[in-house]
Amino acid sequence: MKITLLVVGKTTDKQLDNLIQDYIGRIAHYVSFEVKVIPELKNAKALSQAQQKEKEGELILSTLTSNAEVILLDEHGKERRSIEFAEWLGKKMSAGRDIVFVIGGPFGFSEAVYQRADGQISLSQMTFSHQMIRLLFTEQLYRALTILKGEKYHHE
């Protein structure tokens, strides 16, 4: 069982990237984890928002395996408290399927990606940059894993 975070474009902020890398290292103590980066589209400014979503969607779909459970990080997804997310994750991990969490581009996901997805999660009703969400998600994933192990990172 492996967890993957699939993102569109590199993290360009070095401070954010350092923090993300720290959490990636922490997560690796609990589960096989990888961040896969889909390159940003070339000449994206010449494309409409819909065209960008379609092209990014094609790249996302080409990266996914048929047996992976695909969860979109999406503003329309279900919000969960950290403990609820940990319980949900524990059930998913027990099922043994690889899980791929996907952060789309700045305009969201194409309809084809929504059709392929097995679920959606929202980290907040607020809007964050796609680069900031990478940090928030990796921290929450680490937090969930420590909750599942009964460790003292999370206080409630």
Image (tube, grey):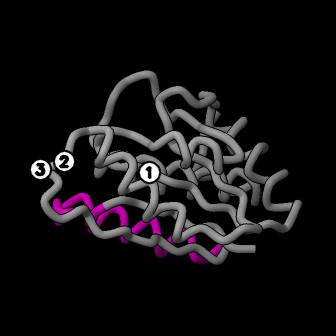
- Sequence-first disc among 1 and 3: 3
Please state if 83 lies on the left or on the right of 6 as rendered.
right
Magenta range: 9-30
What quarter of the picture does the C terminus occupy?
top right
Label 3 residue SS: helix
- Sequence-first disc among 1 and 2: 2
How packed mark 3 is, by other alpha carbons closer than 10 Å (few <14, some 14-19, many 20 or more), is: few
Q: Which of the 4 image quadrants contains residue 95?
A: bottom right
Q: Which residue is mark 1?
A: 103
Q: Which of the 4 image quadrants contains residue 100?
A: bottom right
Viewer-proximal residue, 1 or 28? 1
Q: Residue at x 37, y 68 (%)?
A: 38
Q: Which residue is mark 2?
A: 47
- From the top left corner, tell me how far across and down residue 97 is, in percent: 80, 66
Q: Which residue is mark 3?
A: 46
**Do the residues bearing badges 2 and 3 touch, measured as CB atoms within 8 Å?**
yes
Query: What amino acid is labelled 3 in the image?
Result: Ala
Residue 29's place in the image compared with 74, above or below, is: below
Residue 77's place in the image compared with 100, above or below, is: above
